[in-house]
Image (cartoon, rainbow, N blue to C red):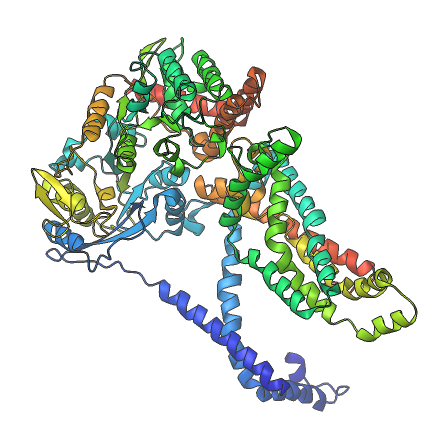
Amino acid sequence: MQKVQEYNPEWPSVRPVAKNKKVLAKLSKDKWLYVLLLPGALYFLVFKYLPMWGVLIAFQNYQPFLGFFGSQWIGIGNFKDFFINPDFFRLLNNTLILSLYNIFLFFPAPIVLALLLNEVRKTFYKRTVQTLIYVPHFMSMVIVVSITYVFFTIDGGFVTQLVEQLTGHKIDFLTSLSWFRPLIVLQTIWKETGWGTILFLAALAGVDAQLYEAAIVDGAGRWRQLWHITLPSIRSTIVILFILRMGSALDNGFEQIYLMTNSLNRQVADVFDTYVYFVGITQGSFSYSTAVGLFKAVIGVILIFGSNYLAKKSGESGLF
Amino acid sequence: MKMSKYSKRLVTSLCLGLLLVVGIAGCGTSSQSGTSAGEPYKITIMTDSFNTDHTDAATSPVLKALDKYTNTSINIQWVPNSSYTDKMNITLASGNMPTVMLITDKTSSFVNAAKSGAFWDLTPYLKDYPNLSKSNPIVLNNSSIDGKTYGIYRARPLGRLAIVYRKDWLQNVGLQEPKTIDDFYNMLVAFKTKDPNKDGKGGTYGMVVTKYTGPWDIMQSWFGVPNKWGLDKNGKLIPAQLTPEYLDAVKFFRKLYQQQLINQDFAVMDPTKWNDPVTNNQAGVIVDVADRANGWVKANPNMQVAILGSVTGPKGLRTPATSGYAGFYVIPKQSVKTEADLKKVLAFLDKLNDKPAQELVSNGVLGVNYNVQDGAAVPVKDKDPDTNDLNQLLMYIPDSLATKTAQTPTSNLVTDIEKANEQIVVSNPAEPLLSNTYATKGTQLDNILDDARVKYIVGQIDDAGLQTAIDLWHKSGGDDYIKEINDAYAKVKHN
């Protein structure tokens, strides 16, 4: 602003004024749009950005009664406590393994399903299937877990009995250490695969039909078309969703894990999300659990930037 | 065309945004306000509930009558019992406190708040009130923090824990009432093998256990294990799991599991379904609070139920004492600013223990919610939203005075057993003692030992594995916990 007011012979004074005018003109042209934008912007400022300062209690010994300003600042003490805690590596381990299960087993599932649906020629059949596979998404996790309990309980569960008939062994799925993660991923796949196809189907709908025609003329079969046209066309969608997925790699879904945890599988079931709940809400160590949550968020941001960087390196457009 | 579509979407999202802003701002209005001497004093109470429908304070005839009796204007914030601790901690953190608040656990956030002066210290005031002055000193001590009373406890029977079993089943298998642990074991075996329900098919088993750890704690006390904390040879307090008797107890539990005398899925079974196998004629025993018998008979009136205080073990008849209270009501300084107001709140809490108030809160308004027949209260309807959960407000100091609903043989039995059990209860010497470590790491510490016990019972770990878990407990803060409890104990003993 100051520079504009200063006289400088080398700069024709008309220019910045003109630029300013341009901005003003633009502003005034769309002024109602900006006015309309105001409440939305305010909403984000007040309810999303202001509360973020609460994260600072991670560096305090926060006592609710003393409040934010009365509580003692202790620097990175909470983080230190967390990293030297014997639980830390178990939690990190459980969280990461579960995330890897999810990325390798769950992430490809909607893509495969979307590709299969894409090959279906009968529109009516395709639409019906699409609608039906969205249904599980709208079920609450509590219901999904209850269904799992009914099917897998050692006391006459359907799956347990089936396995016993086939193999002669009685497996207690619900309390077994080795079955905990597969069950969690199975639940996620059952619940979210259908819903996950939406974006991929949208991307598939956008593929230019001429490409397929050309490929057919060149003598390409179904598999060739899939490999050389369909997959490359939705590659950027896959990459973007993958990057987003990486950002929440350490979120394992509190509800699901909490409901599936019991005395016998806690060793593998304890993850950051449930730990934050136990320490923060049930024991009231607000600062410590905030520190854990902040650590998780930082890792999430690093993973997003990291995978975005890698995506760009490999020639994709990435997220930003 | 494009523009209009764009702006339409914009308008929609803006409207939504505005709605959110307005909606959230609307929720923030506070309802506290001061009152002069004669006017009814406004009291907000946060307490726990087990039902979902409660009559609104503005329309409830019971609350109106109670308002009149105590010269207050009562508003109750119901919080589901299952998530009460969560809500309690969040309320403490939010700083937006009710006038009277139920504290169910001495969580670290509560203890810290109490120590930094968030609540009125009621110790010097109690003697001025006719009912509150008659508080039981043992229970008062149990509920205190560093010797100070911050809350008025809700009294519960000390000898509430017992064995509830099917009397008809016992007769069907031709056994006598169990006297010793071995008898108890034989009863469970017979309930599994001797077709106690006379249907000619198998499929029955002895006892129902859930993922709730209470029954193990009760049964291990029969073996001589102390109630949470006990004295060792040197007069120091040690946790129950470190006593030699503990191993005998868990070995017995493992035997019950291996012989399938208890349900095999107990580690994942929800406690809300605890009674189902009994009322469905699948199992015959539950070790828990004696009043569970009332629920059985209600669900299946043809059932004959018996209750047994305990069975004799190596150290005689024993059962753990409860803490004698189920939570206590505290008065935050933030919502009750002056001593004059505090006295009004205390007078209200005191009056709640009067007979007319207890009558109102337990049974409702005479003629509207209940009638009296042969000296017993008869509710007009089952699960009346006017009175649902209102008895959670009661402290029963010094006693429960309301007209009871008609007594059944079972409910009389429950009362008798609870009375008799007071002679054999083992109390927890560390009940009033505080440990900083436990306050911040309690859940993890308890999980280590409780999980190890379950793993041992189902055979996932052996004696060595149990020892590993105990070692881990020591390392994870158990040592500090023991030291802090003993220091606190020494201090109390000196005074």
Question: Residue B313: which quarter of the image?
Answer: top left
Please say if B306 is above or below A196: above
Return the residue found at the far left.
Answer: B374
Please say if A277 is above or below A263: below
**B430 or B221, nearer to the observer:** B221
Q: Quadrant of the C terminus of chain A?
A: bottom right
Return the residue found at the far right.
Answer: A218
Q: For the point 53% across and 85% down, which residue is it?
A: A32
Percent from the top left, x then y, of residue A16? 69, 86
Q: Is residue B355 left or right of residue A161?
A: left
Q: Is residue B306 left or right of residue B260?
A: left
**A276 or A137, nearer to the observer:** A137
Q: Quadrant of the N terminus of chain A?
A: bottom right
Report whether residue A73 is seen.
no
Percent from the top left, x then y, of residue A106? 67, 50
Q: Is residue B329 left or right of residue B444?
A: left
Percent from the top left, x then y, of residue A311? 78, 58
Percent from the top left, x then y, of residue A58? 53, 47
Please say if B430 is above or below A255: above
Q: For the point 58% across and 41% down, which residue is it?
A: A271
**A306 or B338, nearer to the observer:** A306
Return the residue found at the far front.
Answer: B200
Q: For the point 46% across and 19% down, which residue is it?
A: B256
Q: How many marks?
A: 0
Report whether residue B89 is seen.
yes
